[in-house]
Amino acid sequence: MTLDLIACPTCGGERVNHALACGTDGCRFMEMVCYRCNGEGVVPRAMEQWIADGERLRQRRVEELPYRNQRTESARLGIDVVRLSRLEQGLEPGGAALLEMEAIP
């Protein structure tokens, strides 16, 4: 079985991201291995849906009143805060299940 792969939406298949890094010796631009594809340049096509679901999760969390930070929201949902962060970033599947559980359009 082969995976249906697409170019990474974060790095555009370039395998790296450019970032401004600041430290004790000042700031400089540098290349970093892409966090989404881990430097592979490709991701499973399914990740497009993970990203869309994650954006909806985050949007609901920050726009609903009262506002909930990730720690509060993860406790409310009964999941680890790191998992919620990864779901909101579209780095792993599972956002759709939370959206359905919460009946979010």
Image (spheres, helix red, strand yellow):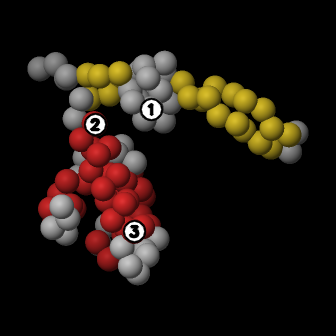
Q: Is residue 77 above or below residue 16?
A: below
Q: Residues within 10 Å of mark 1 (few under 14, many from 20)?
A: some
* Image-based side of 65 in relation to 19, left or right: left
Pinpoint residue 46: horizontal percent, then vertical percent: 22, 35
In contact (CB < 8 Å): disc 3 and disc 1: no
Q: Amino acid at mark 3?
A: Glu
Q: Name the residue that disc number 3 marks.
A: 63
The residue most toward the left is 1
Q: Is residue 100 visible?
A: yes
Indicate the secondary structure of the residue bearing disc 1: loop
Residue farthest bottom in this picture: 66
Question: Quadrant of residue 56 in the image?
Answer: bottom left
- Give the mark, 3 or 2, whose residue is nearer the N terminus: 2
Is residue 68 left or right of 18 when viewed as pictured? Answer: left
Label 2 belongs to which residue? 47
Q: Amino acid at mark 2?
A: Met
The amino acid type of the residue labelled 1 equals Thr
Labels 3, 2: front one: 3
* SS class, disc 2: helix
Residue occupying image coordinates x 39% and y 30%: 9
- For mark 1, what is the residue? 10
Screen quadrant of the N terminus: top left
Q: Residue at x 65, y 34 (%)?
A: 19
Upstream in sequence: badge 1 or badge 2: 1
The quarter of the rendered structure image containing the C terminus is bottom left
Please tell me whether residue 24 is drawn above or below residue 59 in the rendered image: above
